[in-house]
Amino acid sequence: MNPYAGRKYVIGGIIILTGIIFIIRLFLIQVVESSYKSTAESNARRVEIQYPARGLIYDRNGEILVYNEAAYDLMINPSITGSFDTVDFCRILDIPRQEVIERIGSARKYSLYKPSIFMRQISSMTYAIMQEKLYKFPGFFVQPRTLRKYPRDIAAHALGYVGEVNDRDIEEDPFYIMGDYIGVSGIEKSYENILRGEKGRKIYLVDVHNRIKGSYQGGRADRRTEVGRNVVSTLDADLQEYGESLMGKFAGSIVAIEPETGEVLALITAPAYRPSLLVGRVRSDNFRSLSEDTLKPWFNRALMAFYTPGSTFKTVNGLIGLQERVIHYGSEFYCDLGFHMSGYSVACHMHDSPLDFRGAVKNSCNAYFNHVYRNILNDTKFDRVSEAYMNWRRHVLSFGFGNTLDTDFVNELSGFVPEDIYYDNIYGKGHWNFLTVRSLSIGQGELGITPIQMANLSATIANRGYYYTPHVIKEIEGGEIDERFYERHYTSVDSAHFEAVADGMEGVVNEAGGTAWRARVSHFTICGKTGTAENPQGEDHSIFIAFAPKYEPKIAIAVYVEHGGFGNIWASPIAGLMAEKYLYDSISRPWMEEYVLKGERLDLE
Amino acid sequence: MRRSNNILFRTDWISVGLYLLLVFLGWINIYAAIYNDDHHSIFDLSQRYGKQLIWILAALVLSIMVFLIDSKFYSFFAYFLYGIAIFLLITVLLFGKEINGARSWFQLGSFHLQPSEFAKIASCLALAKYLSSYNLKLKTLKSSIVVLTIIFLPSLLITIQPDMGSAMVFIILILVAYREGFSEMFLVVGVMLGVLFFLSLLIDQFLILVILEGLVLLIFWIRSRNTKKALLASLMIVIPAGILFLLADREVLVLNRYSIILLGLAFAIPFYLVHAYRKKLQYIYLILIFLAGSVGFTYSVDYVFNNVLKPHQQHRVNILLGIESDPLGIGYNVAQSKIAIGSGGLTGKGFLQGTQTKFDFVPEQSTDFIFCTVGEEWGFLGTSTVILLFLFLLTRLIFLAERQRSDFSRIYGYGVVAILFFHFAVNIGMTIGLLPVIGIPLPFFSYGGSSLWAFTILLFIFLRLDASRMELLR
């Protein structure tokens, strides 16, 4: 008997122990741990997203405002990248070697196995060279994309721009993945779901060299690409461009609406920026410089700026007075170069006195509308001023003030018309009266109105008492615009009263003594109302609302020129030029056009 | 006629069956691992699976030939075969064809032969022959040296090729010597050498030296049970080393930290020797021999690596050790291998449905990483089945070895068990991330004629010996 026979158990034990360790280990890897499965899938699957072309945007006359141009993102899959000829690579892309290393590093940091963008939007020339040499650079591939192009480079704020999705977008909508583009503002944002189309997807099985070995599940998981749908905007490209040029020297806004439909003909914010600045590789630089600009070209004044309406608001107060029967067309009030009462006075300029309603509108008599507003607030129908005030406020809101108009712009703001509580909080309940809030009678004070709301007021008067919600898209390929844009919104003032206001506004522009002779165009009738908004920042804002022609109006317009002085200095000539441009596509007063374009103030009273 | 019937009757058909099953499973997994639609026939001779079929058929012929030879032949010619193997290992270094930076192959026409595979068989035979020699006193120094020489001579020659994986296989033969009465020390030393081998390539020489010295002092402390002496012994190294360090730090002497520690040691050793001589403490000599051997070993590994090997060979060794792997960084192979196996789940993806192995995510998927295909396509059920089959075969072989009357047959049987076990353990351990990546094949599974034939001959010589176990062999 071999003395060491017992050692066979040691040896057998080592062998069996090894086997048991292996089985336990395999059980842990294969059965307990589940992450290997998904890793294996992502290893061998290459999902190719096929990006649809984004829908085009046309203007109301069928002219293209936004189209697409092919661009190419150079993608990298770090897990496949091997060593390659960096000299050649750097030469093609025209970047230093150090940058290549850094970019690969950051791609690896993002994900080792998931592709990410190595260099965005390489030119088609670079793409052509790259495509041929791609086999030399393992792990790199080219992802076609589309970039937005603007033939006329106008209407930046209305069209909006597209940008890369952020984490929140991805979280909110699983449609998006890292690196996708999404509408960030304007039409691009509000009609994102229509413009974006449906991304296609092809899943391939690939080997370690990323060579395609076949389709995944026989192509059952693939999806077809659906091209984004086109939309037709209500904008008139010519008018928009013209308006932008007129505003070239100013800050402010022009909004033009077709009264019979509510379609926005032009939406101008000044200073503006060219939309092409936000496309392609120049984007980030421009983005920064635009953000730093003190004139805030980012700020969409047309939809977001709160201005006091100034004298243009007299039309509203007049209408409310007529509706509440505290005045009638023939009511006359004296004006002694202003309104003087109980030690308060509001100045007014030199004009005939007394005036009736039409004359007061035409002359923009402050005293007259102080009387009107006093009559509204001191109306004996109501027990208290605050009740009369809230009744007035109800009327004001029915014109679309104090709330968003519910347009198809996403960033529209509501404006501000204070409630009675607002004054209660300042002066104490029951401790304020007409005198306290008298500024409201001439559109100063605590009102905040956006230019689009002002244009809507103009459209409402043009329509003699109702408006359609302003909107910027009139047709959607294979779809309908929202029903709300077909709905008439009547104000709480009877339509019958509006004719008197229109008459007054006709006088403003077309009669001697009217405040806005600079808007006058001889061969058609523009009705308008000037406004001058006092503001704490400096000189008054020059304001004008108008519609034309007087009967069956085709265009309603609001113009704001920040710190432009009286309404007739800048806003009214601009409105006149815009109306003529739209209605006749020609300008009969080139000297007036020149005056505006030059932007040098001349007081030609 | 009666005699051959006798042999057939006595053949262990269980082992033969397990062998055939493993070979068959290996073949279909090679097919699955590199399957492609252009060559879908498993008999397509232009593909590895077709070729493997030829190797398998040839292996069967070889096994029959092994059986036809008289069992006495293996015992009688054991040293002679060993001599041939050593001769081939030397000639392959001179005339071999260099593949992947290693000179381990003979090329005869289109035919490749890897002598290291046959050296395994020859070493088993020689070891069995020597250990079974009459009146052998295993405890003597001389016999220990002979045993270690039989084991490590081929290993050394293969290291030079370099084919670290195959070279390491021989270490496992110490297990055989252990079974025959070698001291446990050799097992420990064997494991230590394996660990040292990796450490010497993976970590800094200086660190290894510090660890070794610490270990030696620890052994001394445990053995002497004398804390004072152990502390004193430590100080004998630390103080001179510390002085040298300070001098080097002030740039009085130009010494690197490795030589500082080594000089500290050199200072202390005479004191140790004197102490050992006076107190007649034999074990101190042993400890010092161990220390000197270890230091020499790590140093020579490093020396060979840095000075003898060419850069591309170093590269290959580094890849082998996972220090340097393919472009994706250290551990890519193991990571991919684990992903492939792990993705198989409980029941696997099904035959030919694997993506990780087929699409080359796993490297060497038909040779060293063939187990990944088993894992991916057959799942945990498949992998545990294969492991159980190997365990069954190995324990069966131990059982067979133990029933031998002849020492030679038993020892050879253990040699077969040891070599198969080593390949099994290291190969699978590597694919599931328990052991570093060492490129050795999984017996009977991995693609390749040389290794399949070598394993077949290795196994069938033993089965032949077992079949004639009634005869007494010397």
Image (cartoon, coloured by chain):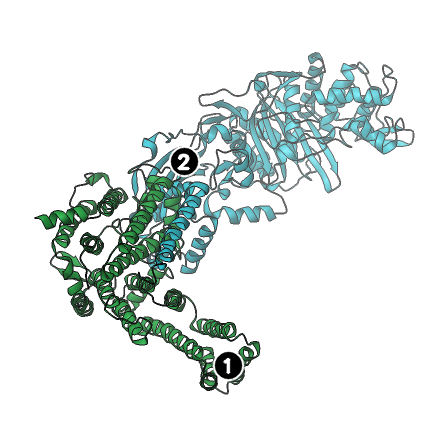
Chain colours: A cyan, B green
Residue A497 appears in the picture as rendered: yes
Picture layout, residue A488 above or below residue B96 = above
Residue A210 appears in the picture as rendered: no
- Depth check, front residue: B100 or A468: B100
Picture layout, residue A370 above or below residue B360 = above
Q: Give the residue at mark 2.
A: A51
The quadrant of the picture occupied by the C terminus of chain B is bottom left
- Depth check, front residue: B378 or A108: B378
- Estimate the x, y position of residue B265 in percent, counting from the top left: 46, 81
- Are labels 1 and 2 assigned to the same chain? no
Q: In this view, does A9 lie to the left or right of B71?
A: right
Picture layout, residue B11 above or below residue A376 = below
Q: Do the residues labelled 1 and 2 touch (CB within 8 Å)?
A: no
Q: Label 1 amino acid?
A: Ile
- Estimate the x, y position of residue B337 in percent, counting from the top left: 36, 49
- Identity of the residue drawn at 43% across and 34% down: A67
Residue reaching furthest front? A1
Q: Which mark is residue B470?
A: none
- Estimate the x, y position of residue B109 in percent, counting from the top left: 11, 58
> Element type at marker 2?
loop
Q: Label 2 amino acid?
A: Tyr
Q: Give the residue at mark 1.
A: B237
- Within-10-Å neighbours for mark 2: few <14, some 14–19, many 20+: many
- Depth check, front residue: A454 or B405: B405
> Element type at marker 1?
helix
- Identity of the residue drawn at 57% across and 17% down: A486
Observer-side mark, 1 or 2, equals 1
- Identity of the residue drawn at 61% across and 36% down: A300
Picture layout, residue B237 above or below residue A291 = below
Image mark 1: chain: B
- Identity of the residue drawn at 50% across and 34% down: A174
- Measure how far apart labels 1 and 2 are at the Cα level: 71 Å
